[in-house]
Amino acid sequence: MSAFLPPEPPAFAAASPRERAARVVTEVLAPVPLVIALLLVVGAHAADGWTGVGWGLLAAAFCGVVPLGVVALGVRRGALTDKHIRVRRQRVVPMGVSLFSVVVGMALLSLLHAPAELGAVVVAMLVGLVSALAVTVWWQISLHNAVAGGTAMVLLLVFGPASAALVVAAAALPVAAGWSRLVLRAHTPAQVVAGTALGGVCALVFTLLR
């Protein structure tokens, strides 16, 4: 098993400008906010008007809000170091509960005949979460980069590479997330690269199912 143990990040007031910037990027590009944003965007794209947003909100409740609540409860009870769960062994239970929540959400979306494109995103997320959980048992992969990489690829697949601004913004997601995790010493370069690669696998699943 990996002996890697990320250090506790410095207090924001005591951090260097570079570390402060990295902490801001880490918070903005954290897995849950990205998951929720992606589901809302894909939902709105898959169905017209507020109907699509509604589908996105339903998916986000199970894939983002419930996992966020589980982590927040764990931090509050002292079972988890922080909302990013620095210690690898502490990630297993929250990820397992999140996995169950995503499965429930996926089943509900299927029963309610949600747009296929949105359902494909949720299945891709499920595959990513199962894979990340399997890896986490013995190694600490970057969940930030897994979600950032997958989000970037899915956005490009949904909207196409026609817009140069979209291409640049999408490519910047995993780069910025990886930079922030390395600056904060939350992951090694190998863990960041592996996370980004896992995001690419999830995007492939999305492509096959959409």
Image: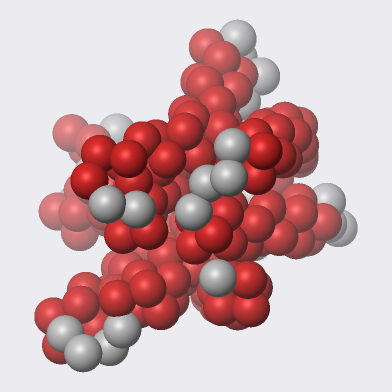
Vertical order, 192 against 100 (above or below): below
The reply, left or right, for residue 139 in relation to residue 51 is right
Residue situated in front as seen by the camera: 106 or 134: 106
Residue situated in front as seen by the camera: 16 or 207: 207
Q: In the figure, residue 71 lies in which quadrant? A: top right
Task: Look at the image and tell me in which quarter the C terminus lies.
Answer: bottom right
The reply, left or right, for residue 111 in relation to residue 23 is right
Q: Residue at x 42, y 40 (%)?
A: 55
Q: In the figure, residue 179 lies in which quadrant? A: bottom left
Task: Look at the image and tell me in which quarter the N terminus lies.
Answer: bottom right
Vertical order, 106 against 169 (above or below): above
- In the image, residue 22 lies at what x, y percent? 27, 55
Using the rendered image of the protein, determine whether residue 135 is visible from the camera's viewpoint.
Answer: yes
- In the image, residue 69 lies at what x, y percent? 52, 21
Residue situated in front as seen by the camera: 42 or 149: 42
- In the image, residue 155 lies at what x, y percent? 35, 70
Using the rendered image of the protein, determine whether residue 178 is visible from the camera's viewpoint.
Answer: no
Vertical order, 128 against 93 (above or below): below
The reply, left or right, for residue 6 in relation to residue 160 is right
Q: Residue at x 13, y 80 (%)?
A: 165
